[in-house]
Amino acid sequence: MENYQKVSSVEKPLVPPVPGLPPDILEMRVRDGSKIRNLLGFVLGRLESESTQLTVFTGASCAIGKAVTCAEIMKRCLPGLHQLTKLHFQQTEDAWVPVVPEAGLDPLTVCGHAPAVWLLHSKDPLDLNEGGYQPPGAPPGLGQLLPRTPPHTPQPKKWGPQASGHWEGGGSGA
């Protein structure tokens, strides 16, 4: 690829994974360089002013963790939010042209698929049967909580010679 130069990179538009959403939804596209405090400051201001009922955080590739972090902080700041999480692939198309046009190389178009997350938050209840739904106040993590087992107490070590003739226990090892 040292003979090519990247000219453009285009993300294909994403169809929302949940049909029937209103057009006034607030969508926050999280990028690698996005500042969490800037994203949350804007979204929390809009949600607290009652002008917005639905928000969506989207993040692809390296920004997935940052999008999930924004969603979790937002749920702590505004208890009572319903969340719907969907995973998908973001399609990108990169255009490459030869550095030296006289070299006889053709321009390239490379299509890629990057993992992405889509996190919908709503003040109103969402469909309980939809996969990826988290009700307000749900503990983080997957599945149900398991009962705690008592911690394992180690047995005291026995000092003395073993059947092999070596001593077990402390010592200098010499």
Image (cartoon, rainbow, N blue to C red):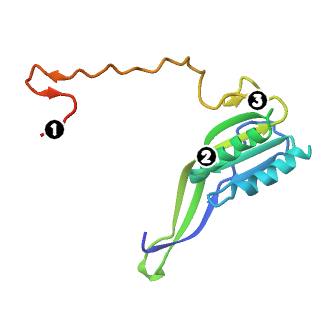
Whether residue 15 is visible to the viewer of this picture, yes or no, is no
Task: Decide if residue 143 is on the left or right side of residue 14.
Answer: left
Q: Which residue is mark 3?
A: 136
Number of the label disc, if any, that sits on residue 173: 1
Crowding at label 1, few (<14), some or many (≥20) Cα neighbours within 10 Å?
A: few
- Residue drawn at the location 53% of the way across and 19% of the way down: 148
- Residue drawn at the location 47% of the way across and 73% of the way down: 4
Residue placed furthest toward the right: 50
Q: Secondary structure at mark 1?
A: loop
Residue placed furthest toward the left: 165
- Of discs 1 and 3, which sits in the foreground? 1
**Residue 136 placement (x, y as % from top left):** 76, 29
Say what amino acid the circle numbered 1 marks: Gly
Towards the viewer: 149 or 123: 149
Say if 93 sits above or below 22 in the image: below
Say if 110 sits above or below 144 in the image: below
Say what amino acid the circle numbered 3 marks: Pro
Q: Earlier in the sequence, mark 1 or mark 3?
A: 3
Q: Which residue is mark 2?
A: 116
Say what amino acid the circle numbered 2 marks: Ala
Towards the viewer: 79 or 18: 79
Number of the label disc, if any, that sits on residue 128: none
Q: Earlier in the sequence, mark 1 or mark 2?
A: 2
Say if 161 sits above or below 26 in the image: above
The quadrant in which residue 11 appears is bottom right
**Residue 30 placement (x, y as % from top left):** 68, 53
- Locate the N terminus and report the quarter of the image it occupies: bottom left
Q: CA distance from mark 1 to mark 3?
A: 58 Å
Whether residue 38 is visible to the viewer of this picture, yes or no, is yes
